[in-house]
Image (tube, rainbow, N blue to C red):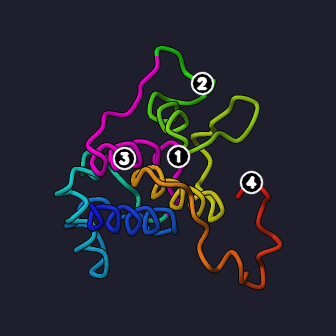
Amino acid sequence: MIKKLAVLVSVVVMFCSSCRVFAATNCSDWAKEIVQTAEQCGILSNETDWDYKTAMSRGELAPILLRSYENVTKKEAPIGETLYFSDGSCEADALYQLGIMNGVGDGKFSPQSPVTREQISKIILTMKAVCEDEELVLPQAYYNPLTDFMSVSDWA
């Protein structure tokens, strides 16, 4: 489980940074091992044509997070009959129900918006806590903040 969670965190960080790699044959050398492991675990697939240069959107991230949750926990994600978000998907709604990923307010998910550093930081910490069925524990950096810590949104 630890290896799968480490792969998940690596994949999420890699995809949300401005480098997008999806099939291990098409990715940069530094990412091949991580991507291959994620493909073997069923977290990633090469069914989508990725452009490698733009930031991942919230809508693109949602199915990857959901597959990761199911793969790591061996639990099926909750899929409701009605969607919470007016512009979301079943995946976005399931992540919201699990407490892993929130919307942007007013019942909106904003699937076309790129994932921000604030959002992915919170998602990674929350995903880890949810997958391990533990309380969210803030990292030491929270108590000894970086110089730009005061610019982080309250929700993050």
Q: Amino acid at mark 3?
A: Tyr
Q: In screen coordinates, is 87 left or right of 134?
A: right
- The first of marks 3 and 4 along the sequence is 3
Q: Nearer the viewer, residue 136 or 48?
A: 136
Label 4, label 1: how far apart the Cα atoms are: 13 Å
Quarter of the image with the N terminus in it: bottom left
72 relative position to 12: left or right: left
Which of the labelled discs sits on residue 100, or is there none? 1
Between disc 4 and disc 2, the foreground one is: 4
Residue that mark 4 sits on: 155
Secondary structure, mark 4, is loop
Q: Quadrant of the C terminus?
A: bottom right
Q: Nearer the viewer, mark 3 or mark 2?
A: 3
Hey, what amino acid is under mark 2? Tyr
Residue receiving disc 2: 84
The type of residue carrying mark 1 is Ile
Residue type at tag 4 = Trp
Question: At which x and y percent is residue 111?
Answer: 57, 40
